[in-house]
Image: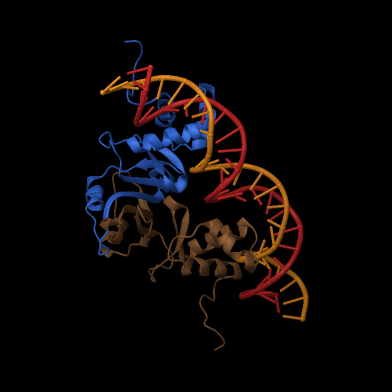
Chain colours: A blue, B brown, C red, D orange
Amino acid sequence: MAKMQKEYNLSKNQQIVFDIIEKSSEPVKAYSILYNVKKKGIKAPPQVYRALEKLIKLGKIHKVESKNAFVACKSSNCEISKATAFSICEICEKVTEIANNKLSNFLNSFEDKSGMKYKKYNLEFFGLCKKCKKT
Amino acid sequence: MAKMQKEYNLSKNQQIVFDIIEKSSEPVKAYSILYNVKKKGIKAPPQVYRALEKLIKLGKIHKVESKNAFVACKSSNCEISKATAFSICEICEKVTEIANNKLSNFLNSFEDKSGMKYKKYNLEFFGLCKKCKKT
DNA sequence: AACACTATGTAATAATATAACATTTGAAAG
DNA sequence: CTTTCAAATGTTATATTATTACATAGTGTT
């Protein structure tokens, strides 16, 4: 029982990258991660991007597409994430993952005439957060 | 009645860029546009990006965030686009704008406990299109 | 040990996007 | 018509985001 283990299944680099993202209160950019892990021996972009890719596959993080940045998944039940929704404040840029059953049920069962079956979606809402609405 | 007029209000560069995107059957990338308009005198990235920015503001095109590519807006009533939804085939990568009242009504009126008021959203669905489902 | 699979290290480069500044154009007001 | 102001353009340089390619090392089987 040497040390507190968090994520057994993550490799060294994956864990380092995940820790950075998880600790952050805001979305983190790939090169910001890279800068922050130089001291830990990760030196080059592919090391970061490979970890990011794996973490996304595992559902431990999500990419906020409109920001090219990454956030840790908050819904504990979202092992493999295929349905993501975020709210993004246009002023302070705060990003929050939306966990709302009505929303996810609606989108997961959405169908249109195209004949396409959707197994995955990403939704990004923009607006003003409570704080910024006041100013 | 000299010529078919399309978009009076667009400037020269904006019109050139818009034409490229509108003619394309698939999302177009900024540097692909740049390459294609070299012959028309547009030589540098900022010229393209500025046109794109304006066209987005006008609602004439949308950016497909997950692909860093641009499509012409198909819903004629979408003058200023603040609510966009796309379906994206994971195999052939075909992108289609979704015009569905049930969907847009639902999302436009969506609210959660965060106290945030959403005035804009972008939704990207992923799946297999009719064609690719068969293979 | 041999194998396959995943992860890592490293250098180089590709692809996407913006900053900064000088100049021109075009429409509206005087 | 000319002054004016905002929008648009042209241009160079650079910032930011992401991938290719290839060599090496760890990890868990059989």
Image coordinates for residue B44, horizontal then vertical, percent = 64, 58
B16 displayed left or right of A106 = right
Image coordinates for residue B20, horizontal then vertical, percent = 52, 67
Compared to residue A5, the image places residue A25 above or below, namely below
Residue B97 placement: quadrant: bottom left
Decide if residue B81 is in sight here: yes
Compared to residue A122, the image places residue B42 above or below, namely below
Image coordinates for residue B112, horizontal then vertical, percent = 29, 47
Residue at the spot x=25%, y=64% of the render?
A: A113
Image coordinates for residue B126, horizontal then vertical, percent = 32, 52
Residue at the spot x=52%, y=75% of the render?
A: B7
Residue at the spot x=25%, y=49% of the render?
A: A103
* Location of the N terminus of chain A (image quadrant): top left
Furthest toward the top, the residue is A1
- Residues C18 and A2: in front is A2
D10 displayed left or right of A108 = right
Compared to residue A97, the image places residue D27 above or below, namely above
